[in-house]
Amino acid sequence: MHRLVPFDELYDRNGLQFLPFNTLYQFAADSGLRKDSDDRHRGLSLPKPDTAGSVSTSSPDGVTNSTAGLTSSTDGRTSSTDGLTSTNGDDDGIALIPDLFAYWLTGVRVAEETNASTTGLVLAADADPHWDAELAERIGVQVDILPAIVRPGTIIGTLTAEIAARTGLPESTPVVAVGSHDTASAVVATPFATSDGEGSAFISCGTWGLVGVETATPVLTAEARDAGFTNERGVDGTTRLLHNVMGLWVLNECVRALELKAGAISGLRRDASADRRPGGRYPVVTDIESVLLEASAPDVPYILFDIDDPRLMPQGDMPSRVAQLCVEAAGRAPDSRAQYVRSIVESLADAFARAAARASALAGTPLSAINLVGGGSLNALLCQATADRAGVPVIAGPVEATALGNVLVQARAARAVSGGLADLRRLVIATQATTRYDPR
């Protein structure tokens, strides 16, 4: 890919950090999706609702790519990209996974803006979202397989007769495009301290950690590129300037592996009577809260290591990999479960704090607070450690920010609520509990 288009130029065009699973690179890796491939003449088509189980398979009847977040068909008969287009007899082209569900429900194939922007094929600098036709041609992607881009809040269509009959809902039921990139919806429901979010960074923390700031326009500087920051389109024409951090994946995998080492059956919740198994070095985990409480004791030593090291991405023996990174960083490895957990949480908090500060600096706004949403907001040790390392308050919650942001965009489309993002966030502040962690 980078032989065809140098990465510096790619960043100027799409504003995305290099992540090998982005759709752009999937097109480059899968010759069957390119316009010069013989596969384009095999009459491939998008899977139908009754073949939903094939979404992660490939066959001459329906090529899909779950890693890239798209399904595709490539026989050359495609819909216009000028607007919403019915796919009655016209179901050829690509569909990002969230848009595939909308297609199954309505028969209309579109690409929702926030998710489309992560493909690498949308021009970052344009206020209105457009596919980068020139870039697509250069890498061998035929532009006419790309569906119309729609903004969150657009009513894509109504239910097909078949779906209405299956569900018992009226055919007039509308299907609304939301911020289908989960972080886009999460940021909608992030209760920033100021109405425009200025001075506040967000962390959407689950398996991954997405750390950044909301901006009015993309930041396409060499500094942002070299720092590994990405510009993803948000709801209402905003940009999410963010950096991907490892998230809770390492913690969950490490705890699970240590539990297995103790002789337990896999899983985080176990009968408290099975407190320790013979021959096991570590106690069996009864719940994650007790593990974090054990690790939060003031006298538990820890080691800071690079939580974003790519060796931590695959499944497997996570404690051994963490131990190796700790040895490389400090010359020693953790020697108890509490030390493993504390080292992981402190290293993650350090990465979060550095990324939040960097995002704010790149956006040109002083960092005054961090809003941490998602499952990680329940982790008090992580929230406090992030506040301590960032030197600013951390506002934790809501846990279900992604679902709330999704519902708010739908509610606004249905005219049940009104206003801009600041108004939607005031609803979140008024109805959702949060916890404040001040730096110590």
Image (spheres, rainbow, N blue to C red):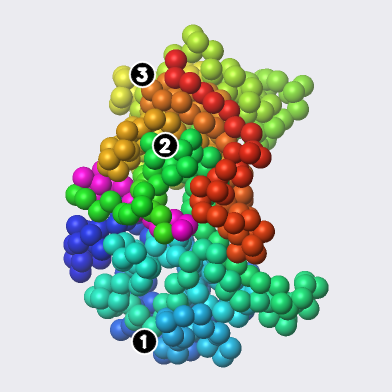
Quadrant including the N terminus: bottom left
Who is closer to the viewer here, 376 or 169?
A: 169
Residue 394 sits above or below residue 43 on the image: above
Q: Is residue 137 left or right of residue 267?
A: left
Where's residue 28, x and y in %?
32, 69
* Secondary structure of residue under mark 1: helix
- Disc sitting over residue 200 in the figure: 2
Tell me which numbered mark, 3 or 2, is placed earlier along the sequence: 2
Residue at image mark 1? 38
Q: Give the range drawn in magenta.
A: 223-236
* Secondary structure of residue under mark 3: loop
- The amino acid type of the residue labelled 3 equals Arg
Q: Distance between the residues labelled 3 and 2?
A: 37 Å
Which residue corresponds to the image point at 41% horizontal and 59% vertical from the top-left?
237
Crowd class of label 2 (few under 14; some 14 to 19; many from 20; radius 10 Å): many
Number of the front mark, 3 or 2: 2
Q: How far apart are marks 1 and 3 (CA)?
A: 55 Å
- Disc sitting over residue 332 in the figure: 3
Where's residue 137, x and y in %?
27, 78
Which residue corresponds to the image point at 56% horizontal and 90% vertical from the top-left?
89
Where's residue 234, x and y in %?
44, 56
- Disc sitting over residue 435 in the figure: none
Tell me which numbered mark, 2 or 1, is placed earlier along the sequence: 1
